[in-house]
Amino acid sequence: MKKQYFTLFLMAALLLAACSKILDKSPESNFTPDNFYRNAEDAKAAINAVYDLMNSNEMYNQVMWIIQDQSTDDSEWGNGRSTANQPKNDLDKYTFTPATTTFQSIWSICYRSINRCNAALERIPPIVMDEPLKARLLGEAKFMRGFYYFTLVRLFGDVPLVLKETTSLNNLQVARTASEDVYKQIIQDFSDAETILPVTYGAGDKGKATKGAAKAFLSKVYLTREEWAKASTKAKEVMDLGAGYDLWTNFADAFLIANKNGKESVFDIQANGLVSEGSLMQGYMRPPFDRVNNINGFGDDPPTQNIYNAYQAADTRRNATLRLYSATGTPAAPAAIVFPCYVSKYLDPGATGNGDGSNNFPIIRYTDVLLMYAEALNEQGAGNTEAYAAVNRVRKRAGLTDLAALGQSAFRDSVLLERRLELAFEGHRRYDLLRTKRLITAMNAQNPSIAIKPYQTLFPIPQTERDVNPLLTQNSGY
Amino acid sequence: MKKNLTRSVVIAIMKFSIIPALLLFFAFCSFASPVNSQDLLNKKITIRVRSEEVQAVLAEIEKLSGGKFMYSPEIIRSTRKVSLSAKNEKISDILTRLLQPLAIRYEVMNNYIILNREKDINGVLLSGLQISQYNSPPKVIRGNVSTASGDPLSGVSVTAKGTQTGTATDARGNFTLTVSESTNTLVFTYVGYQPVEFALAGREIISVIMQPDAKSLGDIVVVGYGQVKKNDLTGSVSTISLKEMKKVAVTSLDQAMQGRAAGVQITQNSGAPGGTTTIRIRGGNSIQGDNEPLYVIDGVPFKNDGVSSGASFNVLSTLNPSDIESISVLKDASSTAIYGSRGANGVVIITTKRGKSGAPVLAFESYYGSQKVRRKYPVLNGSEYATFLNDVNINDGRPAVFTQAQVDAFGKGVDWQDEIFRSAPMSNYQLSLSGGDEKTQYAMSGGYFKQDGVIVNSDFQRYSFRINLDRKINDRLKVGNSLSINRTVTNQSRTDGALGSSGLVTIAALQFPPIVPITNPDGSYVITSPYLAFTADNPVALARDGKNKNTAFRIFGNVFAEYKIIQGLNFRVVVGVDGILQKQDSYVPRSVSSGLSQGGLASIFNGQSVTWINENLLTYNKALGANHNISLLAGFTQQANRTENSSASSRSFVADNLGYNNLGLGAVALIPGSSVGTWGLQSYLGRVNYSFKNKYLLTGSVRSDGSSRFGKNKRYAVFPSGAFAWKINEEPFLKENKRISDLKLRVTYGLTGNQDGIGNYPAYSLLATQNYILNNATATGIGPNQIANPDLSWETTSQADIGIDLGLFNGRIAITADAYIKRTRDLLLNLTIPSTSGFSTAIKNLGKVENKGVELNIVSRNLTGAFQWTTELNISTNKNTVLDLGGASQIFAGEVANIGQNLNSGIIRVGMPLGSFYGYVTNGLYQSATEINDLLDPQAKKPGDRKYLDINGDKQINDNDRRIIGSAQPKYIGGITNSFAYHGFDLSVFLQGVSGNNILNANRFELEYLNGTNNQSKDVLARWTPTNTNTDIPRATSTRPANRISTRQIEDGSYLRLKTMQLAYSLPASTLKFLKVQSVRFYVTAQNLVTWTNYSGFDPEVNRFGQDSRSQGFDYGGYPAAKVFLAGVNVTF
């Protein structure tokens, strides 16, 4: 009897002792590089990830508004509004420092995305799959890498050029690369993408980078570098691509949810609030007093009187872009707000939550291509009829009269104004002012009390980055 | 079949695991060599008899075995004949076969086998311990053993002097013992009491009173994988007096431990029912990792971690505090190293009540009480707010909003705090039954506890059930179990949130203007009003309609078997399980702004976590001669966990009333989530205790842990420790000292580890979902998310401790003092890495933290006569210093929020303690335009704006003008209990406090913002005006400068609290006899009766960030603490 107990006892002990796999616990609800990147579906998912962060708060879903609108003459914080958001104030008033968090946000989000591009570019080639599809996917990764570096180089100047996936904690400190070399890589990436990417996608892939988008970006890169001939060539290639790019009859139609990824769209950041991948513009840019479906806005990105007044009364774009409200309206705005106006470009009456707009954020609209073409041609010589045709096509739709017989300089100014009004709050203003070296003048015209120092046209390298990477030098002046 | 199975199992073990196999081999060897007369029965003999008289058979067995039978002839009716055949069988088996049919049982005593009838002459079952002496006729002695105050003492050993005859008292203190006629004296012994020699003088019914042995206050102490006499402790272990602890009405045991043990800092993070606590034993070692102690309940270890907010669900609340038998807190490395990689933060060992042999004891305990908010936050009333609003507008050059008549008409307005606070009942009912016989003991209990929160619509309920069983199968084998099944339902208020976040009940109640009514004329809650600049959350709607419910179901228990291989050598196997099923339901209603903008948001979270554990322990105790005592422990344990979670949510509801009960009603389904986490731990442990002449005690322990969490390169680690104790009072020069009754010096050193708080897969390279939208639909994206660190390993803490235990005046005063120094290295730090890598942080082993401190515990029995007075005092101090941050000089921590300028509220800096606050230093207000011009501060506009110190002297105020402005770490913590007893009355007064810490009262951000959008603290009545300039409250203006984290929000968090005061009356023995009950105790208790503090918030015990060590002492919208009055009764039948 006792012996039996003891045997049972031992058996129980021994059976338990035999569970030796106890220390081999691998993640079950996360992929690891060991069990991913195996087939075409994995490759596609790896590519979808490289687009993902464009639609994050740290980029085009908020931070970019601050960087591109708040820091220009298009938008000004305060003036009767709460000024609690310090980074916004600092970008607005040019009181920022290397520690201002906005810089860290955009810097890290770009590099996070770049690492995803690099991972895709290294992990996809060994996968056995349909080769044309593989080539296209790699083209997309290069396009997006070009996009992120183009963003970085325009905001910060020289930046570290990382082209390999990070897989180890060793050697993480990288020095800055001369912007000239960064641009070389950007042009290389966009050029590779340009040759391989398709003109259009099948229905399921609508929203991905196309050949037209790559060409448009190349045009923009050349424009930024003042390589005018190359810029106009690439813009023209977009126009002649046969991709069906065209303008909607009404300016406002270009921003309708129903017309997403339509004929006027060259490259958009995709959003759909109904599947929890929404855009914030519709909710955040409307003021708290504006309610749609009981959802109040937050009043971000408040437009300046300066841009409102820049529109001619006949310009149909003004009321499609900006909306006034008043202290005597219903509901009433607080009287303290100096210029009660909000951006109405991104309304989504179907949104069911504040952060759930289905509005795409346009990165390149076809009118942008037309205006780039006009600008690049004009820089190569005044009086180019194709340049007039391109800009007047944009003006005509806005209900404005044609431009004619301007000198090179006046044409340049007109195109720039056209870009401001046509592409308002689409993230171009800062870059346009920077490459035309008009940022300081424009800001002073809007609010003379904002004193921009010349070095501030390049943002400082984020302090946090320099703290952990001594190889990073700071832009002069900071 | 069975043989085959056994063999295959043995083979399996050889294959997989060497150490347990060795353990068992050792067991087998010992088994084969009987060294003690007790093992006589195991001797194997061969015998064959046919139809012989019993007596002859016994004689034959005597010959073969070498043992001797003792029996009285009438037991064996000698004419009876039996047959028996056995080949190489154990004597015990043979005897069973031979004697059982004859209704004879046997006992073994030395080399004698004593035979007895199954029942004695009177039909009373003889106890297994009783050995009669048969050379004289027996007599039966009955009696009762109790304390001086009449409480029965159970488990007292009763022996006839000079014999082995003995028994033990039952739960009511009763015993029955059969002794020989010649026995004149009985000896009563009981741990913690002075032995009694009782002269029978012919009596057969006796009553014995035992006096406590002052020398052994605390008696047996439970330590890791065993227990020792307090006298023999070599490490630093605090035991918590359950008697005092039980006087506090608490939801979970961690709350009851507060202020009871030196060196143990317990902070209630939130006043919410079922809210969490933060426990720091001898300070926080880890920055990023877990700092909570390891809990071991009935041998099953678990961590109460992952608490990210003060109002989170507390896993410890799933255990009923009334079921606890003992709590030990292991503090020094010598005590905790046996828990290896989880011992660095200290270990709390809890055992639950087990049955004792004797008649069933039925006990009923109940209390009922009422709670109310300890303190309301003083805010402006209606008229004051209206005046303030007028000021804001006038200062900004606009007309006043209200006429004086309108201002006066507002009167007090709505007191939003009164609207959300209530007087809340709490009640507890517990029924328990325990008892058993010599072989089987049982303890079972059922309880119901309900606590309504002081905020409406918040409460906590617990249904608990426990059964603990012990069964002695035979002399060698004992089996048993512990099992508790509990269900808790917690309705949580939304409190303790991120700075500036919406939807928090308490902060909303402080901010909502008193001039806005609660409801509209149609009965709906007011959301918009001309006096609400932003659509804000109506606090009443938030409190009443918001739902946040946690339902947890926990099964916790183990089964064990203990086998005595030979005398002194025991093998114990435990298999335990801890299963937690949790469901979190929440609904944000459309009646509040944050819910309205989403059309109502409902979510459900389901989690199940199952941990299993197996322990195999071999213990050996042996005295070698008179001077040497040795005990050994060797063990192999393994534990693994699997946690699976899923969540779903939807929004846009037609109506609020179904809440989260039907997610399908939401028009918009949000992306569901699920995850799986697993971890495993495999450990070998060993310990040696050696004592020489009971004067010099040595302890050495070692544990080797393997963890699934770490990199392939660093999976195993070894944690050794050593201790030496010297009982100086045993030395000849002190032995006769009348004053010093006890003096012991302890010195210990060891290494412990920490592996918690970093998730389950920190060493892996992980990919994550990174979706994008294509063609207006979700397109799955997957990409890199975590960088691999194959070298990731434990945090290691080395700790040296020196302590003394001093007993004075025959134990009337007992003092324990300890000093320690702990250094933790290889901290698990989530280090910022260059973002150019594509990652912002990575976990590495970097950095060092030091804690050193002194602890003092004094128990003094001031008066011991009819009027008794005992004082227990503990006080301790700990100094925490960050020594190294892996090269970095500082890391920011705490809160980052818009309303605090997006700057961190805390900093971790080398040379400073964890939990430092970081910000500006305010030095009053600007009084003139000149002053403003002298300093370049973009935030300063006009006189009356807050002024900050230009710390770096560059004439401008910016981020560089910040410095450390306070510390959340207290300098001293402690508690003092005074207990008085007189006849049936006893009174206990317990004070608890901390001193020298700061709290960041972030509520001030909102309540001193002065921009006319929110209600404000009463302090703003003294706001700056051109005529009232001698103040530190800025001017009122709608264009307020941004808020800065500054000394303005840093407050002294010291407090002393009259935590518990209890007056009780126990009915006297005479009444009890009349009522036919064992004991009745009535009591009234007051909790948190008085709190002395300068802190201006709801309560100085607050931790918005829960257990996060980086960001302690942060108050934003905390759940207020309550004052409790209750009355209760305990009855034992």
Image: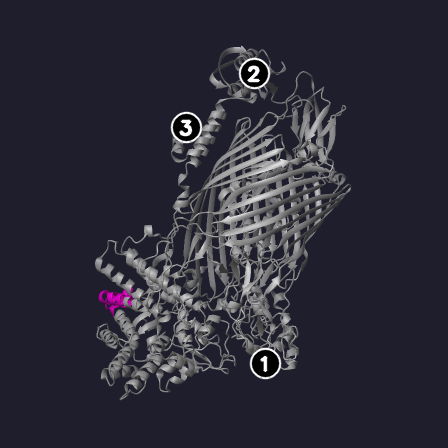
Residue bearing mark 3: B2
At x 45% / y 82%, what residue is drawn? A448
Left or right of residue B874, residue B787 in this image: left
Give the amino acid at mark 2: Gly
Q: Judge whether B769 appears above or below B77 on screen.
A: below
Gap in angstroms between the C-alphas marked 3 and 2: 33 Å
The image position of residue A399, as x and y in percent, is 32, 85
Residues indicated by labels 3 and 2 sit on the same polypeptide chain = yes
Q: Residue B395: which numbered mark, if any?
A: 1
Q: Residue B1019 carries which label?
A: none
Residue A341 image offset from top left, x and y in percent: 44, 80
Mark 2, residue position: B67
Q: Is residue A446 above or below residue B90?
A: below
Residue B919: image location, x then y, percent = 54, 65
Q: How far apart are marks 1 and 2 (CA)?
A: 107 Å
- Reply yes or no: does residue B344 show up in magenta: no
Subunit that carries the residue with mark 1 = B
Task: Give the magenta-colored segment's residue range.
Answer: A185-211
Q: For this view, does A244 lie left or right of residue A106?
A: left
Nearer the viewer's eye, disc 1 or disc 2?
Answer: 1
Residue farthest right in this picture = B866
User: What distance separates the C-alpha of mark 1 from that of mark 3?
Assistant: 93 Å
Tell me the residue at 42%/44% (across/down): B715
Element under disc 1 = helix
**Residue drawn where x is 54% and y is 77% of the image:** B1039
Question: Amino acid under label 3?
Answer: Lys
